[in-house]
Image (cartoon, rainbow, N blue to C red):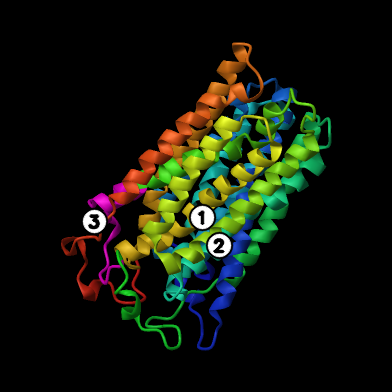
Amino acid sequence: MAVPAFLARSRIVAPPGWTRWLVPPAALSIHLSIGQAYAWSVFKTPLEKTLHLSGTESGLPFQLGIVMLGLSAAFGGTLVERNGPRWAMTVATVCFSTGFLLAALGVATGQFWLVVAGYGGVGGIGLGIGYISPVSTLIKWFPDRPGMATGIAIMGFGGGALIASPWSSAMLGSTPTTGDIAVAFLVHGLVYAVFMTMGVLIVRVPADGWRPAGWEPTAGAVKPLVSTGNVSAANALKTPQFWCLWIVLCLNVTAGIGILEKASPMIRDFFAHTATPVSVPSAAGFVALLSLTNMLGRFVWSSTSDLVGRKNIYRFYLGVGALLYLVIALTTNSSKLVFVLCAMLILSFYGGGFATLPAYLKDLFGTYQVGAIHGRLLTAWSAAGVLGPLIIDGIADSEKAAGKAGPDLYALSFWIMIGLLVVGFVANECVRPVKEKYHEPVDRTAVGSEA
């Protein structure tokens, strides 16, 4: 594939003295934008009312977006490594913004399939390429603190809804029409295009052989699970470690994404028949609050993983997450505070799991093709993007048709999530160091080489 000169990797090699701390802001400009996906629940109820959709139908754009995220990351991971972050960020910008414009057209003309194809299909490609675009670059700039570095950037994906949720809610108003929704999609697409372009212009890659001052690559080799070798993306697929982490990611994401995708209507349903029901603005605030903890969890927990190890932090995510779902299932709607606090912590683990993953992969497989490996592993996110909403939306719709209401709409879903997190915990326990037979020869994985 021919890459325009302006986008070529050779054009963005950092000169001597260039500060690596400009790379996280460049990554954030992409991740804060594509993180809007987590605010989709704000659009669910307006779309259901104006286009006469069910809860399952209104979740389709989000579900397809997550599916396309994983697939585009998997199939585009090697291209991202080869062509560099500026090319990848440009592709992400064009696809993500175009997805919004197509969705606006779909709503304006009453063609919901165009919303699904635009936001979910085209926009989902932007999600996937944008998500992995800075990961390999960040790890190469911060080999001394990979968890912290990827956490700074990837927290933007979790924090995107913190901006988008109140912004979208304000644009839609209390009784939005199809025109209001279409305009909101149009404005989102244009604004995000401008903001993401900032990252395209700023990003740089390190020169061959560059290292942080005073850092030696052997310093981290004494830690458990940290490999001194490098594994190719093709060989990574042959290891049990890859598939154990695939299960871990899939189930941890399923447990979090089910809440995120339906956060706004969920909290309103949960407390609809109590003395103090949740209003629409308060529900939007709940979405923003979940986005905040999702965002902070990505930085706090991934940074903590640099100290306690990746396997230990995933034990925390999965084990405590199962206990939190148990608390919600047992307390039902007796306390808004308990429900909100548990949901916040679950979403912090959800976000932390994403941010810690690239560092976990770097520990196990090295830096040689970590971006491509990361992309392939994100197919687990695609599966979870279908599984989580299918469990929450499908069961809620079924229970509602049976005449149930309140917490009863979600009780079975929460017990299923507990079981999935326990399975994920077991899969994480099965992770062991990668055997040397999967390592690449040293001369093929020199610093600066790419897939």
Residue in view at x 23 percent, y 52 percent? 239
Please determine whether, in this image, residue 93 is positioned above or below residue 448: above
User: In front of the other: label 3 or label 2?
Assistant: 2
Please identify the quadrant where the C terminus is shown: bottom left
Q: Could you say which disc has been placed on residue 352 in the image?
A: 1
Residue tagged 2: 300
| Residue type beneath disc 2 | Val
Q: Position of residue 351 (x, y in %)?
A: 54, 52
- Is 247 in front, or is 331? 331
Q: Position of residue 6 (x, y in %)?
A: 54, 70
Q: Position of residue 361 (x, y in %)?
A: 36, 60
Q: CA distance from mark 3 to mark 1?
A: 26 Å
Residue tagged 3: 235
Please determine whether, in this image, residue 2 is positioned above or below residue 107: below
Most extreme residue toward the left is 437
Residue extent of the magenta highlight: 226-245
Q: Which mark sits nearer the N-terminus, 3 or 1? A: 3
Marks 3 and 1 in Cβ contact (< 8 Å): no
Q: Which mark sits nearer the N-terminus, 3 or 2? A: 3
Task: Label 2: state its secondary structure.
Answer: helix
Marks 1 and 2 in Cβ contact (< 8 Å): yes
Q: CA distance from mark 1 to mark 2?
A: 8 Å
Q: Is residue 237 visible?
A: no
Please determine whether, in this image, residue 273 is positioned above or below residue 36: above
